[in-house]
Image: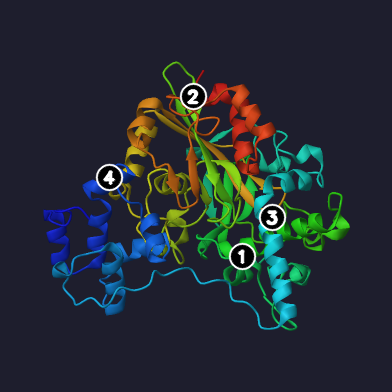
Amino acid sequence: MADGFWDTAEFRDAFATRHMGQVVRVYRAHAHHRRVYGPRGVPQSVVAEWMGLTQAQVSRIETGPPIRNLDTLSHWARTLRIPDDLLWFTAGPEAEPRTEPAPRRAVDPTVAAAQDQWRTTRRYLNTHRADLAIAAVALYHPAERVEGTPLLAHPSWMPAAPVPLDRITLVWDPDVPPPVLNGASEQARHVLPPYAPGRYFRQYSSAIRHLDRPRLFENRPSYRLTAVDWEQSTLSFAATTYFDKMDVSEGIGHEFALAAQRGGSDPTWARLPLRSAVDDPYDLTLRAVAPAVTTLLLRRAPDGSATFILHWRDPRGVATAGGQYDVIPAGEFQPGSVHMTMPNPDADLDLWRNIVRELDEELLGAPESDGSGSYGVAPRDWPLLRSLDKARTRGAARAFCFGIGCDALTLATTFPTVVVLDSDVFDHLFGDAVEVNDEGSIVARWPPGADDASPGIAFTEENVRRLLDHEPMAPPGAACLALSWRHRDLLLGR
């Protein structure tokens, strides 16, 4: 570090607290790091890589109780190169950098081979999702495709026109019975690898955790869709978890990828027993339908033109939709805090708040919500929500839902939505958006890396068609683009 790096009032105050999390927070925001990494300093995700942790763990260290373990404190001190004379403890010797443990290999060679084959198929799925989705959509009636994309929807799932979010009523439905299928169902057996001779993982999520864990992978309470009534603009929900969804949907995707690997032609129903068990993808009783919320963010200029940005989802960092472009933000429909879950789950049952939380994380670099934060608090304590609520009140921010769809490859469901911000609001709130986050990188120019001073990708028919027809777009994001283009006059107020 340069001379004088540690000699600031902020550091003196942080060290006085004897709280390593406070020191880390000041370290990340140091003026030197703002020059190197941008106006927000070192992202938590970068510090997490240095420490061999996740971004959520770094966030908890910054905001949670002080660390007491001497070895852990010493590891932080040595990694950040904090001078010994500033520490309130005696640091141990410099530790070797911590790395993510390699997947545990089974002793039995047959089990090891089966696990390797499972990983190979899993990685084939993650690197070919766009092509596999196009192949999978051929299994369904063409009329079910949303705007010709690989997103499927029943007519009852798609209203005739985009519905403003403030006109949608969300209802809590606590007495719904459990779904018929889950990840431990017999139909899923062939997509689960063994962990010992004759013994198999019971859930797909457990296999991912132990054999092919991405950077972001944790179970969280989620909202399970139980009823849809667009005539009344009413949606009903119960409780489930992210892994309840993944165990079936990613298993269905894995099954399709496995069949595609083994056969020369597109897989047929006879080779897809797990998918066949979900014979009606719109039957909300068959499986835990836990939707994501996928949002196209449009920046509307005074002349009525618009631009947008995309998200390249890094397959090394995400469990789903990796290796594809998607609109941004996108995230699971989940409570923002564990404090808002049962027995009072509907306090945070809000599509708009979910979208704002994802905007905060994916564009402004806020820590990935792990459920321990305070996103369930009042808007006055959440600056971004407060600013966007004010913009909605004066008509400078508008949000719409197009309906509900499911990815043809995995049958995972999503709410395709769009948020339109006047340019002054967009520039004020997101003018210094991050370029990289834990899930991938932000694409604000097309083609990526183009030398163009425009504030995003032009929302034109040429660009929309190019993305839909020639690029690996995630089905929900493709549907958002296609539906937004179809309803562009309404959305842009033309």
Q: Observer-nearest residue: 19 or 149?
A: 19
The answer to whether the residue labelled 1 contacts the one labelled 3, judged by CB atoms less than 8 Å apart, is no
Q: Is residue 328 above or below residue 421?
A: below
Q: Tell me the amino acid under the disc marked 1.
A: Asp
Which amino acid does the dot numbered 3 rest on? Leu
Which part of the image, by quadrant, shows the N terminus? bottom left
The residue tagged 1 is 244
In the image, is 176 to the left or to the right of 108?
Answer: left
Of residue 43 and residue 380, the one placed in the foreground of this image is 43
CA gap between label 3 and label 4 equals 38 Å
Report how far apart the C-alphas of labels 1 and 3 lie in the structure. Answer: 20 Å
Could you tell me which residue is drawn at 81 percent across and 44 percent down?
138
How far apart are labels 2 and 4 at the CA level? Answer: 30 Å
* Residue placed under numbered mark 2 in the picture: 306
Residue 230 against residue 342 in the figure, above or below? above
Q: Where in the figure is residue 230, as x and y percent of width and height?
A: 62, 41
Q: Is 102 in front, or is 398? A: 102
Kindly report the distance in space between the C-alpha atoms of the residues bearing marks 1 and 2: 38 Å
Element on which disc 1 rests? helix
Residue 348 visible: yes
Q: From the image, state whether disc 2 or disc 3 is nearer to you.
A: 3
**Residue position marked by numbered label 4 in the rendering:** 34
Residue type, label 2: Ala
> Label 1 neighbourhood size at 10 Å, few (<14), some (14-19), many (20+)?
many
